[in-house]
Image (cartoon, grey):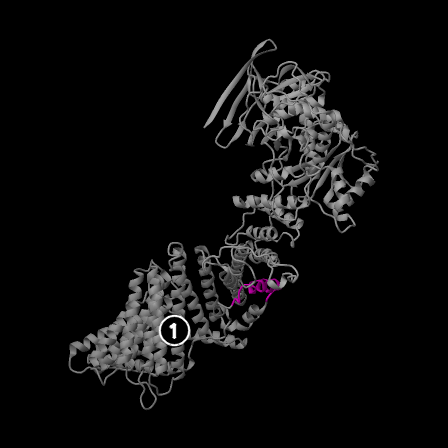
Amino acid sequence: MHSTTTFYAILLYAGHFSSFEVHHVMLDREGGSLIYSLCYRFVVQGTVICLSNNEVKSRAVVKYSAAPPPATYALLQEKTDLKLPPANWLRESAQLGSAGTTMLGSSSKSKPFSSFGMAYDFIDSIGNDVDVVSDSENIKKLLKIPYSKSHVSMAVHRVGRTLLLDELDIQELFMRSSQTGDWTWLKEFYQRLIDQKWQRKKKSKEHWYEKAILSKFLYYSINGNDVAEPVPSDTDACAEAEGCESAEYGPSWPATFNSSTTEGLKNDFVRNILWTFEDIHMLVGSNMPIFGGGRYPAVSLRLRDNNKPINILTGIDYWLDNLMCNVPELVMCFHVNGIVQKYEMIKTEDIPDLENSTFSTRVVKDIAQNILSFLKSNCTKEGHTYWLFKASGSDIVKLYDLTTLCEEAPEEKCQNPFTLPVAVLLYKVASNMMLKKNRKHYGTIRTLLLNCIKLLDEEKHPQIIASAHYMLSELFHLDDSSEDEEGNGESLRNGGSEDSYSEDEEDDEEDESCSYTSSEPLQDCKAVAVIKSVGELSVPEKYKSTHKIRPNCSFPVSQDKEEKCRLVLSYVLKGLKAVDSSIKKESDLPAADPNTPIPLKYEETAPCGEGLKLPMRSGMLPGSWQHQMKLQLFLKASKAYYVLAEAATNLLKYGRALRYIKLALQCHDAYCAISSGLYPRVLLFHSQCLYLCGDVQLMLAQNASNRAAYLEEYNYQTKEDQEILHCLHRESSCQAFNMATDLATDPEYQLFVSSKCYEAAHDLLTSEALKDLGQEQLAQVLKRLGNIRNEMGVFYMNQAAALQTEKEGVRRTVCAAEQELWKKSFSYFEKGMQNFEAISDSVNKALLLCNIGRLMRICAQAHCAMTTEESRGEFSPEEALYYNKAVDYYQRAMKCLGSRESHTAVWDSVNWELSTTYFTLATLLQDYAPLSRKAQEQIEREVTEAMMKSLRYCDLQTESARQPLYQYRAATIHHRLASMYHSCYRNQVGDESLRKQHRSLAELHYSKAVRLFLNLSDAPCELLRTLLERVAFAEFTMAGQSSSAVKLKTLTGALEIMRETCSAFRLIHKELQDQQQKEAFDSPTSSGLNTEEVMKLIGVFEPSFSFLLLQLVKLSTTSKRKSR
């Protein structure tokens, strides 16, 4: 439960009734943390009045607190002797936390990696939200630089827009360097440029005395009724102080890390606070004890010597501590020689106005903003360790890049103990950003990871390096069609940090006891940046942060998929190399010493087969980090090669596509070799690889003419691909998919492989693991299966047609090979139809029915009867059977489509094939009439029926590419029907009514045929032939007429028909001229005009025309004689 309390204190200010407002003090009991959200201000008639003529904005939120809720402090009686320790002194106290036991100085110095401990705990805030992470003591040191003569030595690291500040004790480093030699280069640099002579100055006994009575005072404030114990002797006290001093400088600096863990980088602060000071956001650690009591829920206790006035450094110290911890009041206990005199309550906002300690909060704000801007403008390289240094008594602040100095050092043994913590932090921040999956941060993540990798030694930290390379590869979303090109930069906000309290509040005030003497050179070329005078920090906006956080952090978004995938594969390869380098085989292990006994430990063995983890092919153990990382890297490589194969397919580079899909499947093979089970998403991706492989094999089969170029593409391999393949072979032979990915020379085999790939993908998608996940892909695979089966059906159908063509002109019967090809073709067509039916694809089903119709027509053509003279025989029953079957399949296709609107192109195609089949059937029946089996009249009826059905499917109205073809066919049908009725009319004897019917039908069809041929510009011979046949029909009709008037009428009609031949002759003349012109220019002629046919028709035309004119003269002469 949250409990919220609001407090008001009535004050009188400037003669007006005012209120001091402290709002929203919240205690969070659930998480064991204490959250303060306080705002101090005077409200006078609705106007905000600056505190002490200064206006500062401060807000603090406790993110974590190990301390219990503040308990009321004990008010010590006057004359209490603080030199006497209380009974509970130096015992563990939840109220004081670590502050009480450390007040003597055993851990008063900030740990060199304290900011990293906080950063690890609050990784979400690092890089974006927070400007500074540090111990509160370091923050106070920086803000007091213009007021203090004491030295400042801090290590600065940058992560994104966040700066991590840690105390850098140079003298301690130099003491360690004499033992380890790690920092000799820095020691020489320091002595050469900064301090020719340095030595550690021990702190005075007075210093340790003041710390001791402060510790006792805090313990008294917890329990003031305990009996005091005798004070230790001076000797003991000195010994204790010396022991504390040696402890202070002993274990506080950890040795260089040898592992990638964060051991030794713990967050030891009692509370961590997000402190917003003006526009600066800081994450600070504090150990300041907070008590209850007074008018507010929290107060801080301070002990002061009554004989020593509070100076400005102490005032700033107290004020900043209270602001950071959101403590509204300070309780000051004054003593003289350890004897308590009195208490005084001071509000936090009154501290800047204390006597002898007056300071401007605006100036402190300006100092904070200037220091932050100075550091952000100059600490620009992530992964580098910067050193902010000000010598004691000096006004100059310098910033050095220790990483660069370390690289320039001549010694081989140059180590920076900050390197590993910085690298781990960069990695953790990048990992945290990756989890958020915000592409705007991808440029930042990439920079963080690259800097992390740059800092680490692959031999010592292969796990982090492998993981970092994997995350770099994950930045590229290979399954997306486009990358989000935004998010490549970051905004630079001014300031923002949180801070907290350090218990050693007076170290900076009188730090000359451990001072750095200064001999400032006129110029220091090694410094990155210099503040020439600390006074500049008090000038508002003297330093402005103009440096862009990451000028080169934009995420490289390439529109070229191959380039993008190549980047991914380069990261995968580096990750695999890092993993492989960490796997030790038996041959790599040191030989056992025969003189050293091998310790044998008793362990309960699991039952046979249970819990047994055998090493894999490479020596890697299942469940190890190497195992998990390889699984992810193999899968990422497989996806990259899949995208490359897809892109190559789109570019029609099928040889390259097959090579890439082969590598993708080899990666999957290696994945399967080390995986205990396959996840549904992996199976789903594997099915995609299989049906892409099927696509490529199909394209190779269809483009056999370019096989040489495809073979060259297929055999080419980059060095990177070879190295990745080598890494794969450490775990698997990678032979499982050789059949599917080999480049064959036989199109039939390629179609077969393609079909098997689709079938394997179909089996995966219909398995129990993917029955709910792969429905969308299942439809695609079924469509591909239907398509490949159609292709295979067409392949075998074409082979059958080719076999039939080879036997043309030769007396033949249907052979077994032809029948086998028909069966294969028909079987694949039927299976393809089933696949399309499963996904309700009526259009493709109609196309397959159309193909079966064509197969039936090929079968009909194969059953063509031949006579002994090797000429075409009568139209056989087998031909009729297969043509009728073809008609049935075409009609099923039409029914499947439903209407032309469903798919215009397919409908028109099926319609044309159906019309063609009827026309072919009628033509063959007419030209090779089976008179040995059927009567003439029956054949004529069947021909007429088939011709009319073909005519019914001739679409003469719709404008399309086939419209001229339909017109030509319709004209041909009418011409053939007219010729047939013409023949019947000539040969019919006896039944006059039937002869009249044939005559009228012949006239009708001749007239329709002529009308249609006249609309065509490319059929002059057909038009001329039809007209001449019609003239011949008129001549025959006239021969049977007895009346001169009727004959004259018929003759006149025939001459009118002859006049219509002018159109045909003009078309023939035009085509002949065009042909001559092309021949004159040596251009190949493609004219369809048959000159021999033209000459024959002219040979018929001339006598026919002469005969008509002669008959006209005769009739005219006879008529004149009769009239006389």
- Residue 91: x and y in percent read 60, 29
Residue span colored magenta: 717-734
| Location of residue 592 with respect to 323 vertically, above or below | below
Which residue is located at x 58 percent, y 36 percent? 129
Q: Quadrant of residue 116?
A: top right
Identify the image quadrant of the N terminus.
top left
Q: Quadrant of residue 16?
A: top right
| Location of residue 926 with respect to 400 vertically, above or below | below
- Residue 523: x and y in percent read 82, 37
Residue 56 shows in the view:
no
Q: Quadrant of residue 1097?
A: bottom left
720 in the magenta segment: yes
Identify the image quadrant of the C terminus.
bottom left
Which residue is located at x 70 percent, y 24 percent? 210
Q: How many marks?
A: 1
Q: Name the residue beneath numbered marker 1.
A: 1019
